[in-house]
Image: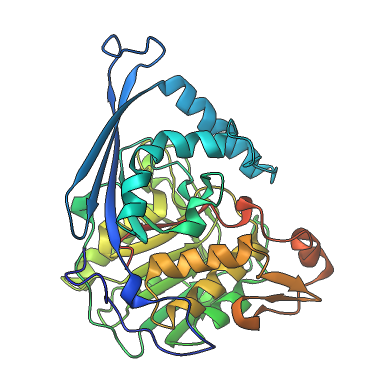
Amino acid sequence: MPQNPSQPVSVRAANGASPFDPALYNPAILRIGFSEAKGKTANPQADAFLDLTLVPADGEVQGSRSEVSLKRFTELLRKLYGQSASQSQLDVSDPGSPARQLHSILFQPVVEQIEKQRITTLLISADAGLQAVPFAALHDGQSYLGERYGLGLTPALGLTRLEVLPEKAKPQLLAVGASEFVGLNPLPLVPQELNQVGKGEATQLFLNRSFTPQVLLEKAGDPLIDRVHVATHAEFLPGGPAAARLYSGIGPMSLDQLAELRQRRGETQLDLFSLSACRTALGDADSELGFAGLALQAASRSAIGSLWYVDDVATSALFVQFYRFLDRGIPKAEALQYTRRAMASGTMRLVGDQVIGSGGDVLLSGLTTAQQRRIDGGLENPFFWAGIVLLGTPW
């Protein structure tokens, strides 16, 4: 974690006042893991121990162990995914709802310490199987976890670089994407998304046929590039990384090709690899963290992907708003947190054919009637924002 977490970064004044106060910034690590305990628990319905370890930047490490039923946990998680995928209400006023119950299981034992130490940011180190939890959608009866805290997720702390990098005045961004495909639905907002995410940075942009696998690997492999944003289709097939596909402008490339970035970049990691594509954070059993996970292992301190099939209008708007916050010098987890807040509160909204974001910024414009219809009910439902997750370094 940062050596001086109270002031990890400066915050540039741009596009209005920043919601981020460096003086209040206080990150912590939360380790979450299950261990088999069949026949060892006091509760006959429980068959596992849940171990929570809170590691603050300052102060003592806090630990907690509770007994849980893996069957019940799995059922709650399945119900939460079902509600999210169908854009149903999560019934957060009901203590028995999956969003409330999962929060109670996974966070309630350490909530008192988190609040007492005024922790603002949680880097969650989760065991296999827990990485599928949409932590941002969990609810304590007052607010969603993704609104309340900056959240990062890692499969292993050993894969996560925790040092703070010197801030660059103009981070170099590579923005690539495809809007036209053979045999797949078009993504007509990709050109606008790429232009908007690169608005505040020195940007190299490659769209459709100019976005080739070789361009992605060569450009992202340049140590001068700090951030990579990819907007396209993706899919997972049985067989692990070699079978998973990311669609460039001339055809698919396999997941394992991204591993070349480590060799190309040497010791200089990317700061961020964001993937605006369908279900990129989770893959099959051979590749649980999917494209975003491999991006972390290959050459990036942080990556962003999605847990479920996402609406492309809402996702384009989310990433544009995220980069607007990021360009103000706000840490990545908080930039995503404030974006979720803007969506969950209705601040990000459809006005005519435009999506308006925080501070009245126009995020997207010229939406077709069909595109407007998909979000005309608002973006408050966690379906639109809770599935986008930050992996790796949260700052």
Residue 325: percent from left, percent from top = 48, 77
Q: Considering the image in quadrants, where does the N terminus appear? A: bottom left
Q: Residue at x 35, y 60 (%)?
A: 121
Res 246 visible: no
Comparing 297 with 181, the one in front is 297
Residue 32: percent from left, percent from top = 30, 39
Q: Residue at x 38, y 81 (%)?
A: 329
Q: Considering the image in quadrants, where does the C terminus appear? A: bottom left
Res 125 visible: yes
Q: Which residue is drawn at 22% across and 72% down?
A: 164
340 left or right of 91?
left
For the view shown, which residue lies furthest in the right direction?
369
Comparing 304 with 345, the one in front is 345
348 left or right of 338?
right
Comparing 207 with 369, the one in front is 369
308 left or right of 39?
right
Q: In this view, does 15 lie above or below 28?
A: below
Comparing 297 with 7, the one in front is 7
Number of dots carrying numbers: 0
Q: What's the coloring here?
A: rainbow
Based on the displayed image, in which of its 4 quarters is residue 11 positioned? bottom left
For the view shown, which residue lies furthest in the front direction?
116
Residue 274: percent from left, percent from top = 43, 66
Residue 269: percent from left, percent from top = 24, 70
Q: Is residue 238 above or below residue 290?
A: above
Based on the displayed image, in which of its 4 quarters is residue 41 positioned? top left
Q: Which residue is drawn at 40% across and 73% down?
A: 228
